[in-house]
Image (tube, rainbow, N blue to C red):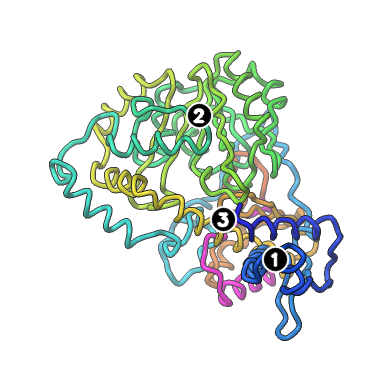
């Protein structure tokens, strides 16, 4: 951490411990500068960080004061408790409703799980795309290698050092986004009737894909902070043929499995010969000091199929993803050949150039800062505007919040009314195949913060109160 970040973290600890209480005036910039032996500018930067984290608030002509953090007032949602013997329930077309208007710019798109386009480095990507037309021998019009664009795979392999990965170019296969990687994994490893274990709630696209491929979905209890417990998987290990986890910042909960749980999960599944598909789509969007390691980091048997993409960090429309399928590499390549021959060379080459330029980490650092500040603003708004008894997740990465209302609310039934007010949410029922989560919703905080957005959250809260 830089000096000002370290200073901000020290003050945040004092606030969390209660040494600095809500309403206390922070020491003056001059005092902190003298006591800590740092420049005044360092203190100012530290206070700005604390303000962005909703720890302190600035009052003109008065200084900085400790403010109440909404997460101290609001509890986290309950851990899920899906049925072991569920009867599938129809979702009443909720997914279709949500996506029917997802490109409408007049609607506040709290329902989507992708940051606003203003978060992406469009100008730099355009330059990389132009460069790709020059560096590809065919100008991007020809087929690429079946395994995928070489430049992309080289740089994804290099980037894996951020989580202790030991990947080489030949360990990776490019795909058209993370969902394409997951689809290939499903086709390579399953047959109709096989049983797949997933988190609950989990991204609805995974559920619909599994259902359409004839798989039986086993929804696992999931904690909103720590994700799936290996003991819960162990208790049902005889029923599981394959497992899929979003171990880092699950969508929609935002949960992140502790490293010891990831290691235990990989060892447990490997002992029983059960492959683990890992969707690590959100791992680079972390708010802590370091990127959390994926389950793949603990894979010694090649049983983890690690999937990633830049769809949430750089360019959703480029459809550039990849996977490290371990011992299943030949099966994946065979299927990719049959289904798509090769990927889109031009966009893969462009992303390869962007990663190679060294700008990715700088872009991510700026993006994480904005998203973290937004998450605190959203949590504050939920605390201020939503009904009594509301619970909200505390994501340490990603860009979605999971909101749990009191039982009896039905966010699916509220969807049309909210849409008429220019607000789109993702009802909780979308994220399960079971009869649960009706009183929950997912909100996307990957939007530029503004007074208008704050007013829309206020309006959402008023409708929920009614």
Q: Is residue 459 magenta?
A: yes
Q: Is residue 377 visible?
A: no
Q: Which residues are magenta?
A: 438-466
Badge 1 crowding class, 10 Å Cα cut-off, few under 14, some 14 to 19, many 20 or more, is: many
In terms of sequence position, does the residue under pointer 3 or pointer 2 come before the other? 2
Q: Position of residue 237 (x, y in %)?
A: 65, 19
Residue 416 in the image: above or below residue 261 = below
First in residue order: circle 1 vs circle 2: 1
Q: Residue 63, position in %: x, y?
A: 74, 79
Q: Secondary structure at mark 3?
A: strand
Quadrant for residue 234, please give it: top right
Question: Crowding at label 2, few (<14), some or many (≥20) Cα neighbours within 10 Å?
Answer: many
Secondary structure under the numbered disc 1 in the rendered image: loop
At x 77%, y 69%, the residue is: 67
**Marker disc for residue 277:** 2
In-image side of 231 versus 358 (left or right):
right
Task: Return the residue at label 3.
Answer: 426
Where is residue 389? Give x, y as percent: 80, 59
* Mark 3 → mark 2, Cα distance in angstroms: 25 Å
- Depth-wise, is mark 3 or mark 1 nearer the camera? 1
Q: Which residue is mark 1?
A: 54
Q: Mark 3 vs mark 1: which is more N-terminal?
A: 1
């Amino acid at each position: 951490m830089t000096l000002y970040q370290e200073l901000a973290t020290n003050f945040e600890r004092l606030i969390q411990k209660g040494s600095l209480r809500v309403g206390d005036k922070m020491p003056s910039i001059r005092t902190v500068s003298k006591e800590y032996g740092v420049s005044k500018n360092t203190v100012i930067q530290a206070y700005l960080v604390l303000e962005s984290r909703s720890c302190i608030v600035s009052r003109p002509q008065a200084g900085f004061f400790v403010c109440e953090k909404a997460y101290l007032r609001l509890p986290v949602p309950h851990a899920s408790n899906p049925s072991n013997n569920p009867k599938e329930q129809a979702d009443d077309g909720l997914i279709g409703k949500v996506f029917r208007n997802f490109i409408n710019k007049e609607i506040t798109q709290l329902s989507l799980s992708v940051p606003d386009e203003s978060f992406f480095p469009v100008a730099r990507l355009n330059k990389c795309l132009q460069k790709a037309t020059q560096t590809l021998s065919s100008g991007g019009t020809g087929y690429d290698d079946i395994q995928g664009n070489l430049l992309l795979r080289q740089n994804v392999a290099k980037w894996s050092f951020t989580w202790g990965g030991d990947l080489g170019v030949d360990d990776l296969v490019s795909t058209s986004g993370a969902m394409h990687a997951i689809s290939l994994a499903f086709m390579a490893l399953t047959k109709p009737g096989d049983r797949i274990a997933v988190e609950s709630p989990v991204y609805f696209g995974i559920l619909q894909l599994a259902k359409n491929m004839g798989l039986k979905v086993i929804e696992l209890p999931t904690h909103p902070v720590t994700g799936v417990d290996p003991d819960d998987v162990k208790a049902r290990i005889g029923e599981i043929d394959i497992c899929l986890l979003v171990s880092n910042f699950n969508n929609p909960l935002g949960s992140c499995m502790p490293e010891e749980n990831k290691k235990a999960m990989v060892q447990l599944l490997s002992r029983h010969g059960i492959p683990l598909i890992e969707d690590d789509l959100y791992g680079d969007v972390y708010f802590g000091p370091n990127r959390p390691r994926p389950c793949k980091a603990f894979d010694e048997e090649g049983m983890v199929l690690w999937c990633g993409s830049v769809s949430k960090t750089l360019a959703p429309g480029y459809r550039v993803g990849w996977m490290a399928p371990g011992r299943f590499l030949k099966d994946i390549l065979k299927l990719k050949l049959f289904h798509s021959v090769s990927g889109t060379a031009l966009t893969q080459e462009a992303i390869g150039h962007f990663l190679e330029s060294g700008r990715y980490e700088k872009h991510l650092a700026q993006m994480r800062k904005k998203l973290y500040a937004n998450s605190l603003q959203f949590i504050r708004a939920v605390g201020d505007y939503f009904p009594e008894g509301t619970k909200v997740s505390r994501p340490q990465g990603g860009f979605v919040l999971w909101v749990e209302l009191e039982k009896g609310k039905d966010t699916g039934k509220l969807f049309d009314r909210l849409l008429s007010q220019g607000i789109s949410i993702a009802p909780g029922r979308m994220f399960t195949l079971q009869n649960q989560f009706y009183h929950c919703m997912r909100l996307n905080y990957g939007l530029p913060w503004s007074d208008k957005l704050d007013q829309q959250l206020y309006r959402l809260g008023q409708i929920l109160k009614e």
